[in-house]
């Protein structure tokens, strides 16, 4: 099952306030600096008279410290932006975009379980098969985990964002306490995503923030994956669903889906989820969906 998170980075929330204080400080300093610059040459200390400063161009003489203060502010903003965005946003039209595949849970976190089947094992086996399937088709992939290790949600989000993934596919298993008869595949996405994630996707698509195309990129990925799995794997198609609270789909700076590939609370689903045949069918479906979606992004 997928875990929800609600926290935002404090610094991001407080940023407008921090920026306001910086600007106030610069304006205050700037006044002092301007006063210093506007002193006549004769009143300056001997070391200040003459030299390049006395021969400074007229525009600099007029603008005084404002230019320098502006440059400093620009530099500070650039450094702040650079640290938040260490990598360029990926172009979905790139020839070989990277697909990140995230096997849910792992290590001490087994996820859900039913009828002796453990979610983390199904997730890893299916993720490995999906990656292999995509690589055979010439699509680059990266797995958040390839062995039975524990990862935090933060680890998974950072992994995806640092690698400039084009889309992310997370793989999990479902569980229903109330309805053990329920079975099938469900595909989740997040709309809206975090602001920084939406901004990155908007940049990728070359549209303004808030453009409907940003949300459409995630929903179209979910639709493509859902449709392809329904074709490849004989399982009830439970459709796509918006789950804005899911960390990996909400905070990743690329369109992202989370596939709940079986109900371990259902005996038939659990038994089948553990078989290599079914995992292979699901992996082929997932790969089909991602490949079709990538092709559409490139305008093939
Ligand atoms: Zn899970």
Image: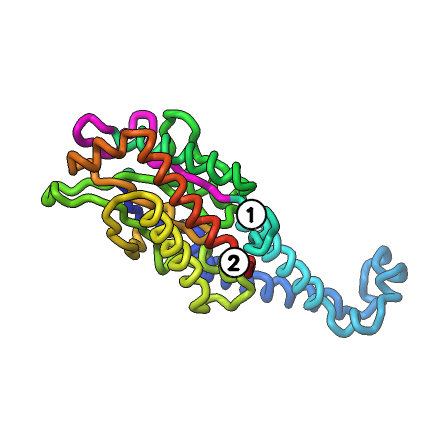
Q: Is residue 34 left or right of residue 265?
A: right
Work out whether mark 2 precedes mark 1 in sequence or the reverse, and give the earlier one. 1
Q: Residue at x 69, y 63 (%)?
A: 33
Give coordinates of residue 246: x percent, y percent: 32, 49
Mark 1 Cα-neighbour bin, 10 Å: few <14, some 14–19, many ≥20: some
Q: Which residues are magenta?
A: 99-117
Residue 64 falls in image quadrant? bottom right
Q: Is residue 280 left or right of residue 207?
A: left
Give coordinates of residue 23: x percent, y percent: 55, 63
Q: Residue at x 36, y 30 (%)?
A: 125
Give coordinates of residue 161: x percent, y percent: 49, 45
Residue 116 falls in image quadrant? top left
Q: Does residue 13 belong to the magenta stretch?
A: no
**Residue 230 appearing in the image:** yes
Instruction: Name the residue tied to disc 2.
Output: 297
Q: Secondary structure at mark 1?
A: loop
Residue 299 falls in image quadrant? bottom right
Residue 298 vs residue 2, the one in the foreground: 298
Q: Is residue 257 above or below residue 68?
A: above
| Residue most extreme to the left | 178
Q: Secondary structure at mark 2?
A: helix
Quadrant in which the N terminus appears: top left
Instruction: Name the residue tied to disc 1.
Output: 97
Tell me, yes or no, whether the two marked residues, 2 and 1, touch with CB atoms within 8 Å.
yes
């Amino acid at each position: 099952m997928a875990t929800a998170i609600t926290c935002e980075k404090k610094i991001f929330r407080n940023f407008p306030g921090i920026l306001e204080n910086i600007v106030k400080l610069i304006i205050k300093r700037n006044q002092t600096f301007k006063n210093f610059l506007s002193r006549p040459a004769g009143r300056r200390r001997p070391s200040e008279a003459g030299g390049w400063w006395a021969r400074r161009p007229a525009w600099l003489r007029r603008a005084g410290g404002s230019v320098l203060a502006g440059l400093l502010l620009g530099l500070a903003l650039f450094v702040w932006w650079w640290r938040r965005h260490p990598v360029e946003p990926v172009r979905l039209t790139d020839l070989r975009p990277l697909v990140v595949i995230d096997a849910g849970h792992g290590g001490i976190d087994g996820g859900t379980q039913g009828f002796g089947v453990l979610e983390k094992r199904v997730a890893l086996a299916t993720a490995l098969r999906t990656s292999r399937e995509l690589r055979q088709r010439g699509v680059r992939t990266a797995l958040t985990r390839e062995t039975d290790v524990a990862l935090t949600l933060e680890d998974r989000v950072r992994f995806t964002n640092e690698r400039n993934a084009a889309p992310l596919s997370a793989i999990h298993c479902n569980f229903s306490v109330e309805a053990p008869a329920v079975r099938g595949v469900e595909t989740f996405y997040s709309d809206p995503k975090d602001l920084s994630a939406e901004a990155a996707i908007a940049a990728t698509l070359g549209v303004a923030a808030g453009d409907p195309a940003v949300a459409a990129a995630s929903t179209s990925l979910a639709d493509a994956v859902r449709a392809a799995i329904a074709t490849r794997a004989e399982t009830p198609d439970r459709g796509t669903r918006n789950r804005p609270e899911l960390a990996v789909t909400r905070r990743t700076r690329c369109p992202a889906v989370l596939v709940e590939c079986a109900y371990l609370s259902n005996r038939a689903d659990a038994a089948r989820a553990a078989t290599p045949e079914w995992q292979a069918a699901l992996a082929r479906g997932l790969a089909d969906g991602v490949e079709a979606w990538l092709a559409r992004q490139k305008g093939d």
